[in-house]
Amino acid sequence: MSYEENLVGRKLGHEWYGWDGNIDAHEAFIREPKRLFLGIVFVCCAVIFAFLAFGVWGFYPRLRQLGLGMAAVGILSVIGALVLGIFGSIGWVLATGKPFKPADFIMHWLTENFAIFAWVASLYDISQDRLGYSLIEIHNAFTRASLARFSNGRILCLGPRCLDRDNTEQIRAMTTEYDCDFYMAPGGALARQKIAELKPAGIIGIACERDLVTGIRDIGYRIPVIGITNKRPIGPCKGAFIDMNELRDAIEVFQSRFHVQPQGCPAPGGASTHPVDAAS
């Protein structure tokens, strides 16, 4: 397929500008472990700690003369303990599957600053999408751990416009089977508008890694979100699909933790729920 032929029918988001149409170089089927993102975060923390430790060591004689030597060492020890606390709290949630509020705040901060870690990852030839997949896996685990906190309501499945037509019909059929709402969002702004309108109890977001990271950063810590990354065998923004087993698992995770209200029943806050027609 030529470059021109491969771009026909695409509506590339601004994040994909610059893609050269090279299918062979495109990361179509990404799967990365949670340890990838945590490893990059560890590298950042280790570099910062090493820089501070070197500074304390280099200036220690002068700091001791000023009576600040022990204080500097104490501050350095506190920073080291905080780093251990960060990874310890995240590891505890991932290992036990139980919620831990400080770990939620830490993951929220890490997600907010994803761009920094993506830049560091690029120094090791790790793409933004690969790192994003790893972050989404961690976020999904946190969502599963914290679902017991949330009240009853409906599940909203948000899909992107780039999905293959057959896969879209499969998603529509499965969400109907489980009595969930499905909306095919032409863009992030309309997706947020639909979320505000329906006030779902939980969201299953289907998108590429970069869009899911953005969505999680925007709403993933106010409403529980499980992200499902799509596969892109012919490049971004066209002919994408998902593994339907992942969707079924995400729906059942939500439904196993809290009761899903039938269509037409009042949702929390007084908003009524109703079937959502997919928009192309």
Image (cartoon, helix red, strand yellow):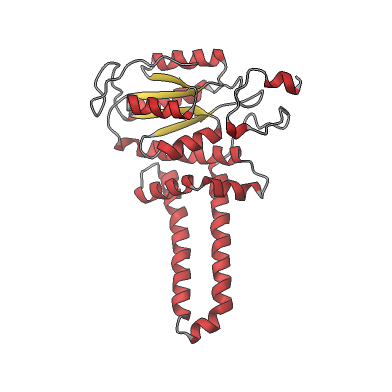
- Residue 149 location (% of width, % of height): 30, 38
- Residue 210 location (% of width, % of height): 55, 35
Identify the residue at image location x=50%, y=12%: 169
Image quarter hosting the N terminus: top right
Please say if 71 is above or below 163. below
**Picture mark count:** 0
Please say if 185 is above or below 72. above
Identify the residue at image location x=59%, y=34%: 15
Please say if 45 is above or below 260. below
Residue 30 appearing in the image: no
Of residues 225 and 119, which is closer to you in this image?
A: 119
- Residue 85 location (% of width, % of height): 43, 57
Of residues 146 and 278, which is closer to you in this image?
A: 278
The answer to which quarter of the image holds residue 131 is top right
- Which residue in the rendered view is the most extreme toward the right? 2
Tell me: 93 left or right of 43: left
- Residue 236 location (% of width, % of height): 62, 27
Identify the residue at image location x=44%, y=63%: 81
Tell me: 268 left or right of 132: left
The answer to which quarter of the image holds residue 235 is top right
Residue 96 appearing in the image: yes
